[in-house]
Image (spheres, helix red, strand yellow):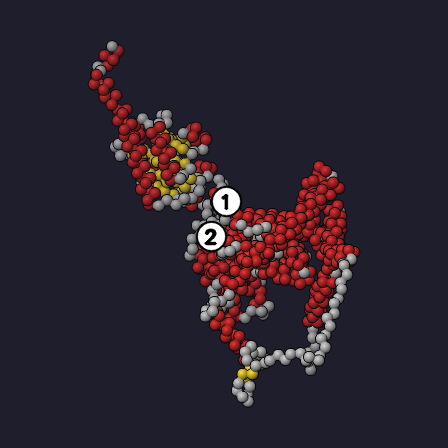
Amino acid sequence: MPRPKSKTASAQALVGLWAIALTAFVIATLYFARELLIPLALSALLTFLISPLVGRLERWLGRIVAVLLAVGLLFAAVGAAGWMVSRQLVDLAAKLPEYKGNIAAKLHALQPQRGSTFSKVFDTVDELKKELPGGSPSGPTITQESGKPETAVASPPHPRTPATPVKVIETSKPNPFELMKTMITPLIGPLGTAFLVLILLIFMLFEREDLRSRLIRLIGQDRISATTQALEDAADRVSRYLRMQLLVNVIYGVCIAVALYFIGVPNALLWGAFGSVLRFVPYVGPWIAALLPTLLALAVSPGWIKPVLTVALLTAIELILSNVLEPLLYGKHTGISSIALILAAVFWTWLWGPLGLVLATPLTVCMVVMGRHVPRLAFLNVLLSDEEALTPAEDCYHRLLTVGEQDEIELAEAYLKENSLTAFYDAVLIPAMSAAETDARLGALEDEQLDHLRQSIRDMIEDLGTRPAVASTASGDDTVSEQEALHNLTAPAMAVLPRCVYCLPAQAERDELAGAMLTQLLQQQGFEAATAPGKLSAGELLGLVEKADVDVVCISVVAPSTIIHARYLCKKVRTRFPKVKIIIGLWGATENITEATGRLRDSGADEMVVSLAEALNQIAKTAPLLAEEMSLAPIPDDEEERLAALAELQLLDTEAEPVFDRIIAKLARVFEMPMALISLVDRHRLFFKSHTGLPEDLAESRQAPRDVSVCGHVVSRNEVTVIEDLARDRRFANNPWIRERGLRFYAGAPLHAPNGQPIGSLCLLDVKPREFTNRDRRHLQEYASEVMEEIGRRSSALSKPKRLEVAISPDPALQNV
């Protein structure tokens, strides 16, 4: 006995039938009511077109005068264009007989010559036609009996047959009223439509706010905000499209008229006007507009140069407008895909004829906007809009399910060109993995497919981990969070990086994969991070945390894993390690965030995040400071000899000298560093002999404490010292003076007195981490040698007068003479 159909299947069938019936009813209404709907559509589009002008005029002239003036200008422009076109048509009709000879010559030139390949083809076709049944031979007929040609002879009329009289029909002169009726009757329909459009346009402009309010009331009901947004979106898109399209078409018509005038094609204004009108027809309109003047150029020109120039110039104008001017003016403001635009043109032309072709694009724009804002009409947005059919996450899921293609790598590379790796994991890979796990739980995905997908994701993570990290140029929320995380590392109150971050999966392999993504991102930022396998028990995970001496634990949760698993593991970690920072990552969660946060905090969690970018931010904020104190600048064993050599040079507490300032300025410019200086290390302080880019207080005081300086380490080690990131060097990460100044990079080369004692350093500083190659080190050492040469010259210049004074006045008693 067959099973009865379920109520759900029956309901779905009824919904499908209802949708089909409703679609058929709408199409039938559009077709049979076209006499009324076409004027309504035309007047609505004209309202969209001139509403901005009416709004501007209304500020100074009032609504009534503004509406009448705008409508008058519109119809005056249409009337002037119509008068110009009619004059041009009359002139063209008068000139056409003059071109009869050129047309005949062109047709004769196009006919194939006797004996050519084309003539042989045509002769063969004619012979085959004769052999077909019913073919009429043009030559003499051969009889079967005699085998001789049989000639048909026309028999003369019988002499006794009376001739048939010819009947002459007299025609009366046409009645003027009938002639007028014949001429006016075809114009009644278009004139009536134009008059109706005019009346509707005027009233729509007068009552546009009232009409909008009634539409919101009728369509929106309890969704006023969404309906208002939809109407504003539709009005903006349609109005902008019509204005920009009108501007482009006028430019197109002017360019055609000017080009044809200089080529020498008659009635250039006529073809320019036709081009402007026909270009409203999508795709085919411009080529129809180019065909007519090309045929006329063939008719008026005895040669082929003028037609070829006409085709070349019209094609060039169309290509320039389509590929340069249109994207600059309105780009993709219509929001319709190319194939949808073509299908819409065919559909509306079938329904409403030529006017439907002109109205196709604006009407389709309105349908796309309705599909975007009305949930039940969302299929219109999917079918017609130029938006991507699948989100990046859905596209990635689809590619991962395709065995053997590996085109998910192409998707990742394309996405990473405009976004960061963190954004790719948050917005693409984790949602794709979550969707696959949910489908597998519902039975829509087989175990083999799920295993293949997991392995593909693992391979992608490993492959992306081998690539250098690139800063994102996107401006999404996830990227902002990532930038905040990096900013937290550069802030004055900067936290030192933790010794270790351990990512623990809440339940399954999917949680492990998300943890592997976070681990990879942390390692790229210089953290020590690791991920635990997803198949371990809670006790085994706690053992790994204990062995690793962890500072931060991040529990990874990917749907369909739930906060229940995260709470259980969080309680275990908090009980075993009360001082460890615990962060729960509910990757991609969007619902009940506040409730989940409260429950997780009750279980011992410090923070709850929903994205990897936010996790980076929180880990940077909650990273504990290093326990050990900062390293003070060591004192060399020969400190007294060094200080004596420094004092002998007489460099301390002296004015700035141009020779050193020039070297410092050049040094900062060559290395593109914001700060550079020559520091002299005294007993308890640094003295800045020359500097550039220092903060105002340091530039004014020209000194700093020695014990917290990096230059003190340079003098103690007596070698080039480079620290690419002070925040990650345990000697300086907790240095309050460096943290207050926000310094992140330091490179210094020791400066020596003539006797070889280190007296200071030539150093570069920056507020962000920098890379410094071996070549850069050599160049810095060369500049340090140049500074030492100048110090030697200065020392020699200072010592010479003293020796001369001793030679001339050896006796102190003679000094008073």
* Amino acid type of the residue that numbered disc 1 sits on in the rendered structure: Asn
Residue sitting nearer the eye, 372 or 468: 372
Residue sitting nearer the eye, 41 or 91: 91
Name the residue: 28% across, 32% down. 789
Location of residue 391 in the rendering, given as x and y in whole percent from the top left corner? 56, 59
Vertical placement of 54 versus 694: above or below? below
Can the viewer see residue 222 in this picture? Answer: no
SS assignment at label 1:
helix
* Amino acid type of the residue that numbered disc 2 sits on in the rendered structure: Leu
Name the residue: 51% across, 67% down. 402
SS assignment at label 2:
helix
User: Crowdedness of circle 1 by 10 Å Cα count: few (<14), some, many (20+)?
Assistant: some
Label whose residue precedes the other's in the sequence (2 or 1):
1
Vertical placement of 41 versus 689: above or below? below
Location of residue 545 in the rendering, given as x and y in whole percent from the top left corner? 47, 56
Name the residue: 63% across, 48% down. 243
Vertical placement of 777 versus 600: above or below? above
Location of residue 604 in the rendering, given as x and y in whole percent from the top left corner? 57, 53
Location of residue 549 in the rendering, given as x and y in whole percent from the top left corner? 45, 53
Name, please, the residue furthest toward the top. Answer: 817
* The C terminus lies in quadrant: top left
* The N terminus lies in quadrant: bottom right
Name the residue: 55% across, 58% down. 101
The residue singled out by tag 1 in the image is: 488
How far, Cα to Cα, is label 2 from label 1?
Answer: 14 Å
User: Crowdedness of circle 2 by 10 Å Cα count: few (<14), some, many (20+)?
Assistant: many
Residue sitting nearer the eye, 806 or 226: 226
The residue singled out by tag 2 in the image is: 522
